[in-house]
Image (cartoon, rainbow, N blue to C red):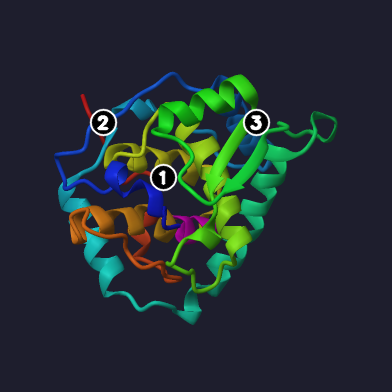
Amino acid sequence: MARSGRIDRVGEAPGTAEVQYFPTVRYLDEAGLRYCRRRGLPVPHVDYHRVVVDPVRGLRIAAAYLEAPWYDEAALGAYRAFREETLRQFDFLTSSPLLGGLAVAVEPVPLDPYPDAAAMARDLRDNRRLRVYESAASDNPHPVLDHDENTMFRAVHDAFAHASIGRGFDHHGEEAAWLKHSFMYSATARRALTTETRGQNSAMVFGYTGRRFAEQKAVLLPEPFSDPAGVTLTA
């Protein structure tokens, strides 16, 4: 899920990124919980403002991502589930309230549309609008997701993962966003979600120390890295 316009915010070397918090977008937080209940998924009780990156774990995830091939056929089942569940979330985000949706207008754009995650959250809160840096504008293609699918994933991740918990695009915020979004996916699809978010972000931060984005891949990282219990919380 490469975000070519955000390397200055999510790609800083470990320990140098400014941690960003902002007011949660309440209707998105409530909608995410409602989605979980409807799909029979566990409803989490987590203080997402306490989530931080464990650098030892981050280094291990980065190494696993960077050592993995660009594409592994064994990952296709997880990516099929991930694609289906992402499209379902996107429909929930954008469809009319008459159909049970949130009526958020998603606008793909060719340049990074917001200065930071707080500005994105304000747009969602005040206007029910989300501008998304479109995948087609990136020179980092995905092995199995097409541009539209990749862009739709960016939209639901920005809305249901970042804006709903009030965490930014710094590496601690990305860890919190991975955790929040992981509860909205089945265990199978979560394996692909982990590659797309936790894996790629760890590779960029700990592998390339913010100098470049990690190549997008369609692989499965070791299963423990997809376990929501494997996170670090501040006291």
Confirm whether the magenta stretch covers residue 190.
Answer: yes
**Residue ranking furthest to the front:** 111
Q: Residue at x 46, y 60 (%)?
A: 191
Q: Spatial distance from mark 2 to mark 3, Cα to Cα?
A: 28 Å
User: Could you tell me if the residues under marks 2 and 1 are in contact, i.e. CB atoms within 8 Å?
Assistant: no
Q: Nearer the viewer, residue 52 or 95?
A: 95
Across and down, in percent, residue 108 comes to: 60, 48
Across and down, in percent, residue 120 comes to: 49, 31
Q: Nearer the viewer, residue 193 or 135?
A: 135
Viewer-nearest of discs 2 and 3: 2
Type of amino acid under label 2: Val
Q: Residue at x 71, y 31 (%)?
A: 102
**Residue ranking furthest to the right:** 98
**Side of 70 where 235 appears, left or right:** left
Type of amino acid under label 1: Trp
Reading the image, the residue beneath label 2 is: 19
What range is drawn magenta here? 188-193
Q: Is residue 164 visible?
A: no
Label 1 residue SS: helix
Across and down, in percent, residue 207 comes to: 20, 61
Reading the image, the residue beneath label 3 is: 34
Q: Is residue 52 visible?
A: yes
Mark nearer the N terminus (3 vs 1): 3
